[in-house]
Amino acid sequence: MRPLMLGVLLVAAMTTVSAQPGKKVFISVDMEGISGIAGDDQLSAAGAEYNRSRRLMADDANAAIRGARAGGATEIVVNDSHGSMRNLRLEDLEPGATLISHSFKRHGMMEGLDETFDAVIFIGYHAKAGTPSGLFAHTGSGVVADVRVNGRSVGEGGLNTLMAHWYGVPVVLVTGDDVAVAQVAEGTPGMRTVVTKRAINQRAAALRPLDVTRAEIEAAAREAVARAARGTPSRTAPYRVEVQLRSSLIPEVAEILPGMQRPAADTIAFSADTMPQAYALVRFLYRYVNPD
């Protein structure tokens, strides 16, 4: 082949590659399902091992960031999704990732997500409230007994998946204990999972080696992002939501709000036209309605 023709072909190929847009990835990071975490004293700033668990949390997140980039991500948004939502420190994350921090968020664990993203990743997730064998099993906070959307019981992973699907963004990977990842992946064909620990019960777990889980997270994120393809937004309005609480006090207070119903003493229910609206109301009920 003539040198001039070869040069033209190389330039054309480089132009084609450079014209292909990179993928935009949203990573929601909780703490209970992070590699190496198994104790209450690791989960809040008051705990003796909290600073250690912050590092563990960052390490799992970084494995996902590295994998996502290797899979074609050029823009990554990380949402701190645990407790105060100020656990991750920007300086501990891989350079170039954007961090959403603090708990004063309308959409909590999914704050910042919109239709411009190509893939969603859940890191460090746990089982839903009422799960007898899931490590640290809960939904939102300890005041919630169950959340049902259009009759289906969902945990945080289920709610967050409904949010992603509202925008047409696929959830491509979830990590956490074995019970948690099975719950989140249920009904989502093709979602990749990485088990960071085996739940023995709600307080004990068999922890897998850190180097093994991080390698698996990175590989799974790379493959999942590379294969990610946006879908059609799934919008099954109206969304009928029932939030069952562990006490009747919150429903008693919340019942005075417009549109709220009380089908049982411990349950508050409502309908919403959009999933983002439903999500914000669920978060409002368990986080901001306080009868004490």
Image: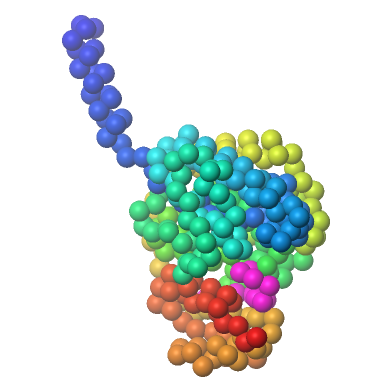
The answer to whether 96 appears left or right of 288 in the picture is left
- Write down the region rendered in magenta: 139-150
Q: Residue at x 65, y 89 (%)?
A: 249
Q: Nearer the viewer, residue 68 or 53?
A: 53
**Residue placed furthest toward the left:** 4
- Assess whether residue 205 is covered by the magenta stretch: no
Count of labels in the image: 0
Q: Nearer the viewer, residue 147 or 144?
A: 144
Q: Which residue is drawn at 36% across and 57% down?
A: 115
- Assess whether residue 141 is covered by the magenta stretch: yes
Q: Residue at x 60, y 60 (%)?
A: 82
Q: Which of 84 and 62 is in front in this view?
A: 84
Q: Position of residue 247 (x, y in %)?
A: 69, 85
- Asked whether the viewer can see residue 226, the reply is no
**For residue 163, above or below residue 229:** below
Q: Which residue is drawn at 42% across and 58% down?
A: 113
The answer to whether 283 appears left or right of 59 in the picture is left
**Residue placed furthest toward the top:** 2
Q: Nearer the viewer, residue 128 or 211?
A: 211
**For residue 55, above or below residue 50:** above
The answer to whether 73 appears left or right of 161 in the picture is left
The answer to whether 103 appears left or right of 205 in the picture is left
Q: Position of residue 184 (x, y in %)?
A: 60, 58
Q: Where is residue 188 in the image (x, y as percent from the top left)?
A: 54, 56
Rendered image quadrant of residue 255: bottom right
**For residue 102, above or below residue 174:** below
- Asked whether the viewer can see residue 48, the reply is yes
Q: Where is residue 46 in the image (x, y as percent from the top left)?
A: 71, 61
Q: In which quarter of the image is the N terminus?
A: top left
Q: In which quarter of the image is the C terminus?
A: bottom right
